[in-house]
Structures are given as structure tokens and as C-alpha cells.
Amino acid sequence: MARDKAQVKPNSIIQGDCVEILSGLRSPVADLIFADPPFNIGYKYDVYQDRRKYDDYYAWTQSWMAACVKKALKPRGSMWVAIGDEYAAEVKTIGDRLGLHLRNWIIWHYTFGQATKRKFARSHAHLFYWTRDAKEFAFNDMAVRIPSARQTTYADRRANPAGKMPDDVWSFSRVCGTFNERVDWHPCQMPEKVLERIVKVSSDPRQLVLDPFSGSGTTCSVAARLGRKYIGIDLSADYVANSRQRIADTLAGKRAKTDIAENPESLRHLRKVGGGGTGKRRGHTPKPQPSVKTSENPAAEPVMPLFPARQAGA
Ligand SMILES: C[S@@+](CC[C@H](N)C(=O)[O-])C[C@H]1O[C@@H](n2cnc3c(N)ncnc32)[C@H](O)[C@@H]1O
């Protein structure tokens, strides 16, 4: 049964099917939608089966994206979708056909791929960034600027002291088992740093952020911490209960701050290596590693904390 807007209240995580819930909206609620659907690659979720026939998954993708765009997204709103290689082309085409305006096709390089022997290790996902209107939308560039190479490397006086906009390839580590922000009750948690950048750039304080596949509650936790309203939806009653607690703990300052930076190498010595998870190596005591700069790995340059408050996500 469709729910109307009265039952879709700001600052709530709702248990249910996002297509059904969003289809029941009488007017759009979201200034920003971030969707990280199951990628149809066989992940083990609580109640959702992540292995569907191609046509079935494609039709479902069309239906949830249409519900987001036609029922939930405000006229000046932005929509971001995370997806893997398998369905990136399809998601791009569906978004375009729904009349959205593609602003960026971002590659999230997650810097911690699987070990492979017979092909190169995959270490990226796609982040599509559309707006509903071609010209009118929130884009807070000053909230997401990063130090430029002119500042960090060349000591160039012509450098813009405000830094530069990040490129369209983002390097943030995945949330590994050893990280402080990891929850142990959800199989695929987005890093808060990725959501911080998206929420800051594509929404203003007090605007509403919607996540139709809220999972562990990353989007809603970050939105709440940054002074936005939020609505999350997930099929799993357990994920919903746990993510409500995660948001409460976040707002109460009880959750450890994320230790993921754009340059994960610079934080290697801060990791809890050996404290659990798959990275454990018996008898191995990690030492602080100086960053090594090579032409193949320019990201290994040391990051200078020029904007500590912004980078800390305060
Ligand atoms: C990739 S996970 C989202 C992870 C999330 N971004 C995070 O950081 O934790 C996808 C989620 O979609 C949920 N899901 C699957 N089908 C759904 C549907 N029709 N409506 C709402 N949630 C659904 C699953 O239970 C799962 O938690």
C-alpha cells in the first residue's frame, strides 16, 4: 500500500520498499538524492537477493530511478547514483532518459581492490551526478575545495589560497574492517568521506537529503552531522534499527571520527592494522611509512592540512 507524504517525515529512517514509498509521495521532498543500490553482483544482504536476471534488474532500476526523479526530487534538486561496472552504462542511459542533466561521471577509486592474478584488480566504482534543472541547483564549491599542487608541491605564489576543486576521479579507501567507522552489521558500507563531499557540495544546511537504499545509514548520518534533514529507506528492519542508532550515536558524538582521507597512504600509520579484519599479519608491527612520490603514484604526495576544519568535516 502506498504511503503518502504525511508518513514520510524528515529525519527518519523508514523500513520498506523505496519504489512503493516514493511512489506514494504527493509532492517532491528531496533537495539531494544519493542512491547506492545493490549492484546485482551477489552480495549477501539481510533480506534482499542481490542476484537477479538482467531484464528484471534493469526494469527494477528503471522503476526506482523514475520514482526518485518523478516523485521525490525537487525542481532544483541533484541526484547521485553509485554503481559498479556491470550496470554503469544502463544507469547512465536511464538517468539521461528521465530528463536529468549529467554534470559529472565520477570515478571513485577506492584504493583497496581485490587481489587478482589473471587480470588487473578492480578498484573503482562509478558515481553519476545529475541535476534536475540544467542551470538551477546547489553547488557549494567552497565547501569541498582541496589543496592544489601549486600549494602543496610547487609553492607557487599564484596558487589560489582557497585551493582547487577536486577532479572527477576521487581516491578514498573503502571502509575496511580495521577502520574506526566500520559497522559490523552491514556488508557494504560507503565511506563517510565520499558522502561528506556529496552532501556538502550538492545541498545547503537544513535542506533534505534522501537515500532510498540507506543500508548502514552512512548518508543519513553524514547529512545529520552536517545540519541537513534526512530520509532513509531500507527493506531490512535490522538495518533500519541499527542505522537509527548509528545516527543517534553520531549526533551524540559517540562514534569515532572517520580516519579515511583522500590520500590513504598519508594515514597508513594511524590504522589499527593487526587489530582484526582480513589485514591481520601475525607478528607484524606497522611502522609509519613516509609517502613515496612517483610519476605513477602522484597521489602519494604528502597532504598538507591547509583546511583542517573543512577536511575534518566539521
Ligand atoms: C549497497 S547497500 C547500501 C549501502 C549504504 N550506501 C551504506 O553506506 O550503508 C543497498 C541496500 O539497499 C537495500 N534495499 C534493497 N532493495 C531495496 C528496496 N526495494 N527498497 C529499499 N531498500 C532496498 C538493501 O537492504 C541494502 O541495505
Image (spheres, rainbow, N blue to C red):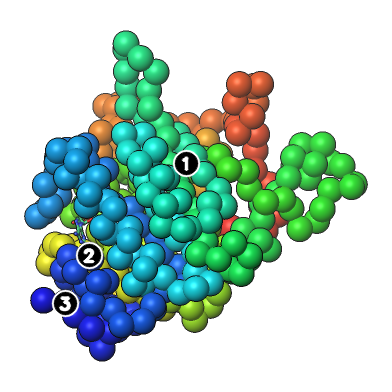
Asked where in the image residue 124 lies, by quadrant, the reply is top left
Looking at the image, which residue sits at the far bottom? 6
Q: Residue 153 has which mark?
A: none
What residue appears at the point 62 percent right and 58 percent down from the top-left corner? 144
Secondary structure under badge 2?
helix
The residue singled out by tag 1 in the image is 108
Looking at the image, which residue sits at the far top? 118
| Residue 273 picture location, percent across and down | 35, 37
Of labels 2 and 1, earlier in sequence is 2
The residue singled out by tag 3 in the image is 2
Check mark 2 vs ligand 1: CB closer than 8 Å? yes or no. yes
| Residue 223 picture location, percent across and down | 43, 70
Q: Is residue 26 in view from this perspective?
A: yes
Q: Is residue 182 in view from this perspective?
A: no
Question: Disc 1 versus disc 3: distance between alpha carbons?
Answer: 35 Å
What residue appears at the point 51 percent right and 44 percent down from the top-left corner? 105
Q: Which sits in the foreground, 170 or 212?
A: 212
Secondary structure under badge 3?
loop
Q: Quadrant of the C terminus?
A: bottom right
Give amino acid for label 1.
Trp
The residue singled out by tag 2 in the image is 19
Q: Dot 2, how many residues are within 10 Å of its Cα: few (below 14), some (14-19), or many (20+)? A: many
Q: Which sits in the foreground, 8 or 276?
A: 8
Of labels 3 and 2, earlier in sequence is 3
Give ligand 1's quarter of the image: bottom left
Give amino acid for label 3.
Ala
46 to the left or right of 98 = left
Asked where in the image residue 6 lies, by quadrant, the reply is bottom left
Question: Disc 2 versus disc 1: distance between alpha carbons?
Answer: 26 Å
